[in-house]
Amino acid sequence: ASSLIRLTDGAERRAGRERRRRIAPALERVTYLRGTHFKTLDGEGVQSSAYMTSYKEGRAARLLEHNPALLALHNTAHLTRVYPSAARVDSSNYAPHALWEAGVQMVALNYQTDDVHLQMNRALFA
C-alpha cells in the first residue's frame, strides 16, 4: 500500500476549464499564502511552504483515519485549515482535538454554539 493519500477535489472537475484570476497581478506579488489543491498529502512537486490547503471536516476525518502520521508530517511544512461541513445547519461543532494533535493550524469552529468543543478551544487558545 502506498503511503500517499490521493485526494479527489474540485481541481480535477475543473480540469480543462480556464480559471479567472481572483487577485490583481499587483496584489498577487504581496500575497504570502496561496491556497492549493495537493494531489497527495506529501505535497509532491510543491517546494514552497507558502502553500495552504483547506479541507471540510469529513475529508480531514478520512485523512486522519487513513494515515495520521502523514497528515502530521504534511503540517510540519504547510498550513492546513479545516472548516465545518455545510450540513451542520444546527451550528454544532466537530471534535477538534484530533486535528490539533495532527498539527492542523487552523480549525474553524461555529461560535454560535457554546459546546464542549468551543470551550476546549477557548481553554487552550484564549
Image: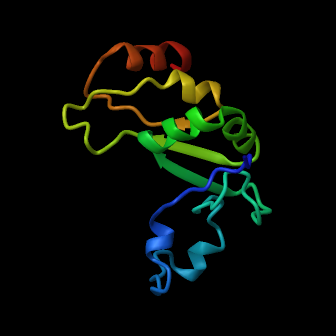
Which of the pair 5/119 is nearer the observer? Answer: 5
Q: Position of residue 113 (x, y in %)?
A: 26, 23
**Could one spot residue 54 in this view of the protein?**
yes
The color scheme shown is: rainbow
Residue ranking furthest to the front: 1
Q: Position of residue 107 (x, y in %)?
A: 49, 35
Q: Position of residue 24 (x, y in %)?
A: 51, 79
Q: Position of residue 54 (x, y in %)?
A: 51, 51
- Residue 73: image quadrant is top right
Q: Is residue 56 left or right of residue 24?
A: left
Left or right, 110 with respect to 50, comes to left
Q: Residue furthest left?
A: 90
Q: Tell me which residue sits at (49%, 86%) in the image.
A: 16
Q: Residue at x 50, y 12 (%)?
A: 123
Q: Is residue 104 above or below residue 16?
A: above
Is 84 on the left-hand or right-hand side of 123? left
Residue extending farthest to the right is 47
Identify the residue at horizontal 33%, vertical 32% (top origin). 110
